[in-house]
Amino acid sequence: MWPRTRSCGRRRDVADLKKGARITGNTRDKLAADLKKKYEKGASIRALAESTGRSYGFVHRVLSESGVQLRGRGGATRVKKK
């Protein structure tokens, strides 16, 4: 049987980040690179936020700061009637 982690079984690629802790410097750069790679492979911002234990806004900001071209919202779009 696999040993349990402190994050209740959830695996995190980046060092164990405490909820609400300020992330700066090298740690933030690593997190930004990891989030960018996953987002560009198709992960949603919400999924990334949940997997890292951070908010949607934080993940959105980090992706924007790292120069990622954010995808548009999904679903049907409204078309003006002529």
Image (spheres, grey):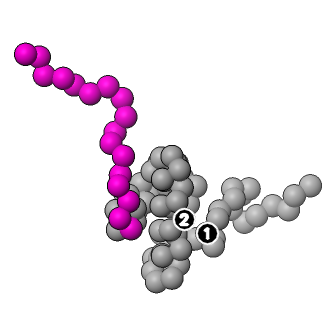
81 shown above or below 70: above
Between label 2 and label 1, give the one nearer the viewer: 2
Residue 61 seen: no
48 shown above or below 31: above
Query: How dense is the environment of label 1, judged by Cα within 10 Å: few (below 14), some, or many (20 and up)?
Result: few
Image quarter of residue 3:
bottom right
Between discs 2 and 1, the one toward the N terminus: 1
22 shown above or below 54: below
Name the residue carrying label 2.
34
Residue 55 x, y percent position in the rendering: 44, 58
Label annotation for residue 14: 1
Residue 66 x, y percent position in the rendering: 39, 68
| Left or right of residue 3, residue 8 in this image | left
| Left or right of residue 66, residue 40 in this image | right
Residue at the location (38% across, 59% down)? 68
**CA separation in Å, label 2 and label 1:** 8 Å
Q: Tell me where the magenta segment starts and ends, as one range.
A: 66-82
| Left or right of residue 61, residue 30 in this image | right
Residue 38 x, y percent position in the rendering: 54, 55
Label count reads 2
Q: Residue furthest bottom?
A: 25
Residue type of the residue flagged with mark 1: Val
Query: How dense is the environment of label 2, judged by Cα within 10 Å: few (below 14), some, or many (20 and up)?
Result: some
Residue 65 x, y percent position in the rendering: 34, 68
Residue type of the residue flagged with mark 2: Asp
Of residues 5 and 42, the one drawn nearer to the viewer in this rendering: 42
Residue at the location (48% across, 53% down)? 40
Q: Are marks 2 and 1 in contact (CB under 8 Å)?
A: yes
